[in-house]
Amino acid sequence: MKKIIFTTALLVLIGTSVVASPSGLGTGNIGESRKTIVGIPGDRRDVDQIVKVSMKETDEGGMIFTPSLLNIKKGETIKFEVMNYGEVDHEFILDTPELNSIHKEIMAARTETHRTPNSVTLSPGEQGEVIWNFTNSGDFEYACLIPGHYDSGMFGSITVQ
Ligand SMILES: [Cu+2]
């Protein structure tokens, strides 16, 4: 009996962490629900570093972020200046690899655009920004979850130490 109760509690925990993500899966509530293990939305007055990220398709049929690897110091607030150099829409979503993977499945099933602090969706030639405070160390990811794009190579890794 104890085992069953434990399993249920674990499921509730997993469910809660998914809903608490600001990655578009959540309820859109502000405040506490915006916190994820990736960190929290940053304040532009606290920006420690600007990172320019470009998004584009390659001649070989791939889709890429440049850079695709980033190292960030724990506690830093980063302003990502994201530019779409491609010929189709792209998006930049900051999350854990696990949540991006779940989110990718949801995106495949329906069309949705993102308007969350950890993401920006850009038309060709458009520029946008995400300001994020990396409050926790760990391995995180930025990804474009428009159907087919992630599988074409559109993701990057962030290591926060
Ligand atoms: Cu894309």
Image (cartoon, helix red, strand yellow):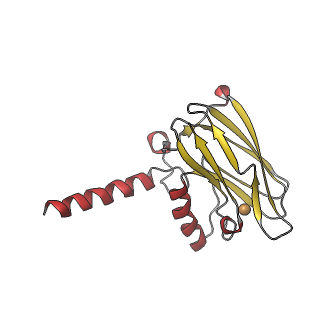
Q: Nearer the viewer, residue 115 or 150?
A: 150
Q: Nearer the viewer, residue 147 or 75?
A: 75
The image position of residue 159, as x and y in percent, is 59, 43
For the C terminus, the image quarter is: top right
Extreme-bottom residue of the structure: 109
116 w.r.t. 87: above or below: above
Using the image, determine if residue 145 lies above or below residue 49: below
Q: Is residue 5 left or right of residue 136?
A: left
Image quadrant of residue 154? bottom right
Q: Nearer the viewer, residue 101 or 161?
A: 161
Picture residue at 60% right of the left edge, 35% below the top: 42
Picture coordinates of residue 98 (x, y %)? 51, 58
The residue shown at (84%, 64%) is: 87
User: Which residue lies at the image location 71% right of the left edge and 51% below the top edge?
Assistant: 68
Quadrant of the image where one finds ligand 1? bottom right
| x, y percent for residue 113 | 65, 60
Q: Quadrant for the N terminus, please.
A: bottom left
Q: Residue at x 38, y 53 (%)?
A: 16
- Is 161 left, or right, of 148 in this rendering? left
Q: Is 3 left, or right, of 103 in this rendering?
A: left
Q: Position of residue 25 (x, y in %)?
A: 51, 58
Number of on-image labels = 0
Q: Is residue 85 above or below residue 49?
A: below
Q: Residue furthest left?
A: 1
